[in-house]
Each structure stands twice: as structure tokens, then as C-alpha cells.
Amino acid sequence: MLRSIDKNYLAKAIKDFCKGTSVTTGNFSCEAPGSVQDLEWNHMDQSHRPFIHSTYSDELRISLGENFANSLTKWGNWPFFINVIDVRVKEGQYYQTFTIGGLIYVHTVIEMDFINDDNSSLDISWHILSHWFLRPIHKYLDKKIYKLNVRLQEEDYVIRSQRALLRKYGYNFKSDPPDYCSSNKLTNNTVYPSLKYPIKINIKEFTRINALNNKKRSLYKFGEKEISFIVKKISNIEFYIWPSVCPHEGASLEDGDFCDNRVTCPWHGLNFTGSKLSKEKNTISKYGFIYKLENDFITISNNKS
Ligand code: FES
Ligand SMILES: [Fe+2]
């Protein structure tokens, strides 16, 4: 970052800039599972918001760089525009600003810090500024921002704990280290750990034990806790296979919506077609794995090429 006002002098700098400004400050802090790096990715990844939070579904990205995002959003269906500027000030520190009707300015500082190998801290503080005659609105806005943050952090828990678990299991992501560009790439970014040995599935042993759940009939899970696969049984000679971790950024595809030969991921709504194995086409290579159907067995091994 070329230049930014230190967060400790922000309120004073803005007050000095415009005399008669009334300032209200608020704060929300919590602990979150995972590393600072994954919290940063989660913060900069804007595509999960409509799916995980039901917010910013109507957002127009005006411009995006490694350290900033300039977005236009609106109030419901009204042509009432709010320009949101997100900036990565330095590692673990972000500014987010927007104005409401040019009369109220909201500046938020988001900070992430290391606690231990399992958890990081998240500290969000905001300044609401306006002419003193709009001060009664501050209380309402302050409450709304606080409540919004409580909800967002709760909803993000599933993403953060899953990423923390995957890191432990040896997963990596092509979007590392995250920035606003890499965090918003809807490509296959998951780098799976290597299988210690090939996984062998007896196609005569699709049982209740490895059935996904009662609602998802014909779906079965096989493999190790670190790396597993979902198999959809079409018939005794036809199967679809997916890694149970999403190729995009690591969601559990067990929570996805399966329809025919596709699954829709719950984090960003991407669709993934399963690898189809049949007697006619008994070998397929996808997402770094080779799937083979032979003599009543499906074998999954690493694609070494
Ligand atoms: S993690 Fe993004 S679509 Fe699955
Ligand atoms: Fe989020």
C-alpha cells in the first residue's frame, strides 16, 4: 500500500477535515478457526456472499486489483447506489468505506491476527460520521452493523473450520497467497494431498455404512478421512465419481446439491460434472486422480503425470 492514514488517527483526521462532524464508533471481536491467511482469503472472496450470507447478490464490480475492490451495490431494488471501497492496507488489515447519500460516511477497519496454530482473532471496528443533525441515525446504523457482523461471522464458521481442517490434512490452494484477484478466481484452485496408497472400492459393497445419507440415495462415500470420494451408483456397470472436497476452494461436496451427473457446491454455486465410469469407458483422469473400473473394483490412484 502506497499510503493510508493510520487507523488510530482516522477519526481525528476526518474530524479535522470537516469541523462539526459527529462520530460514533463501534466494535465487534471474535475468535475464528484457521490461519490469518485463510481469514484473509475468506474476507476478500466476494463470491461466497450471496450463497453463504444472502448479501450483496446485486453487486457490480467496477474494478478489482490485488489490493483493492471497488463495488457498486444498491438498497433493495431501488436505484439508490452505495459505492463500497475495500482496501488491503497490509497483511491482516483491511479498510472498507462507503457513504450513504453523501451524508453519512462509514469507515470500517478489519484486523486479523495470529492466536495459535488453530485459531486467529478478528477485530472489526467502525466509525460512523455525519453532520451532528444526523446523529440520531448513528445509533440505528451502529446496531445494524454490529448485528450484521455477528451474523456474518457465524455463517462464515463453516468455511473457516473446513479450510483449517483441510490445511491439517495437507491440502493447498492455487489461490495462495490470497489477494482480491486470486481470491475471486472461479477456477479449480484446490491442490489435493497425495493418496498414500490407491483406494479400492468393491462395486458389490455399496452399503448403508458408506451411504451419504437417507436423502441422497445412490450416493456413497469411500476413502480416508484426509481424502475421500463420492460415488453415485447409476447401475452395476455405471458410476459417477467426485472428490468429496470441492475442486474450487475446498467446500465439502457432501453438502452440495446432486442432480443427474452434476453437483452444485454450497459455497460459490459452481457445478461439477462427475467422472463417468462404465464398461465402455473404464479409465478417467480428473482433478489429479485416475479412476479405473476393472473386475468388480473401482480403483482410485494419483495421476503422476
Ligand atoms: S468451494 Fe467454491 S464452488 Fe466449491
Ligand atoms: Fe463471509
Image (cartoon, rainbow, N blue to C red):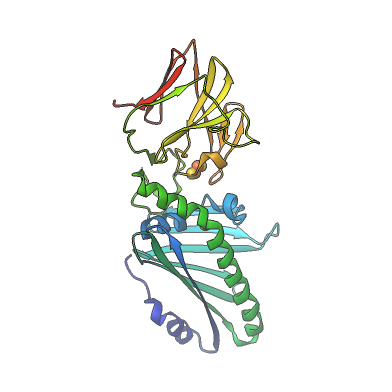
| Residue in the foreground of this view, choosing between 268 and 29 | 29
Question: On the rendered structure, is 154 left or right of 227?
Answer: right
Q: Position of residue 302 (x, y in %)?
A: 34, 28
Q: Is residue 171 above or below residue 219?
A: below
Residue at 42 percent of width and 63 percent of height: 87
Quarter of the figure with residue 8: bottom left
- Picture residue at 48% right of the left edge, 31% below the top: 242
Res 289 → quadrant: top left
- Viewer-proximal residue among 80 and 44: 44
> Residue drawn at (55%, 61%), measured in percent from left and top?
154
Front residue (pair 148, 232): 232
The x and y percentages for residue 194 are: 32, 35
Work out whether 290 lies above or below 72: above
Residue closest to the far bottom: 20
Furthest residue in direction right, as rendered: 77
Up-down relation of residue 12 to residue 86 (above or below): below
Image quadrant in which the N terminus is located: bottom left
Image spot of residue 47 (x, y percent): 52, 49
Q: Quadrant of residue 147?
A: bottom right
x and y percent of residue 41 in the render? 42, 54
Location of the C terminus (image quadrant): top left
Tell which residue pokes out farthest to the top in this image.
280
Q: Is residue 143 visible?
A: yes
Residue nearest the observer in this picture, 101 or 95: 95
Tell me which residue sits at (40%, 31%) in the image.
287
Query: Is residue 241 depicted above or below 156 in this figure?
Result: above
> Would you say 251 lies left or right of 171 here?
right
Residue 181 visible, this angle? no
